[in-house]
Amino acid sequence: MTDNPWKFPPELPRCGKYVLIHLNNDNWIDEGDYNGAYFQVAKRVKDDYKEENNDFSYSWETFGPDSHFGQDVDAWMEIPKGAPRKRRPKREKHHPMTDEEAKMFWEAIKPFWPKDDADS
């Protein structure tokens, strides 16, 4: 068994570093989505002013227009590193994890994944 890679506030990543976050609010709730399985890649940013609805002096920004208040994230972890990058043709963008890295990643997110009746 590996050490738990998840970290919990008040331990935080440095500002500007992208990490995998688990959001404690609902996901999109599309048909077939699991409740509680809401993960995003985001970076922590320091807010120069504390917004009215934000309980903390930092927030989380994603790659897109989305952002989250400090209290919306209940756990975070370093992004697993993939296989060493090699120079490849521009059209190839896929960068897979090794089987071991994929297994470690699944073990890390499994506690947050809701149990399905079939899993019981």
Image (cartoon, rainbow, N blue to C red):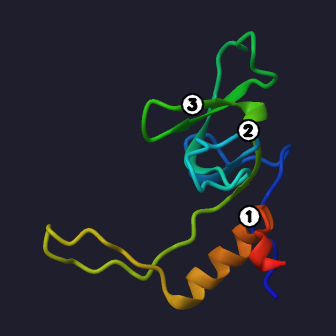
- Sequence-wise first label, 3 or 1: 3
Say what secondary structure mark 2 lies in. loop
**Where is the N terminus found, in terms of image quarters?**
bottom right
67 or 13, nearer to the observer? 67
Residue shown at the point (58%, 41%) measured from the top left: 28
Point out the frontmost of discs 3 and 1: 1
Q: Nearer the viewer, mark 3 or mark 2?
A: 2
**In the drawing, does residue 63 fall left or right of residue 116?**
left
Residue 91 in picture, x, y percent from top left: 14, 68
How far apart, in angstroms, are the residues tagged by discs 2 and 1?
A: 14 Å
Tell me: 3 left or right of 25.
right
Disc 2 + disc 1, Cβ < 8 Å: no
In this figure, which residue is indicated by the disc labeled 2? 25
Which of the two labelled residues, at mark 3 and mark 2, occupies the earlier sequence position? 2
Q: What is the quadrant of residue 48 in the picture?
A: top right
Q: Is residue 69 above or below residue 116?
A: above
For mark 3, what is the residue?
67
Secondary structure of the residue carrying numbered label 3: strand
- Name the residue carrying label 1: 113
User: Given the image, on which type of amino acid does mark 3 rest?
Assistant: Ser
* Mark 2: amino acid: Asn
**Percent from the top left, x then y, of residue 23?**
70, 44
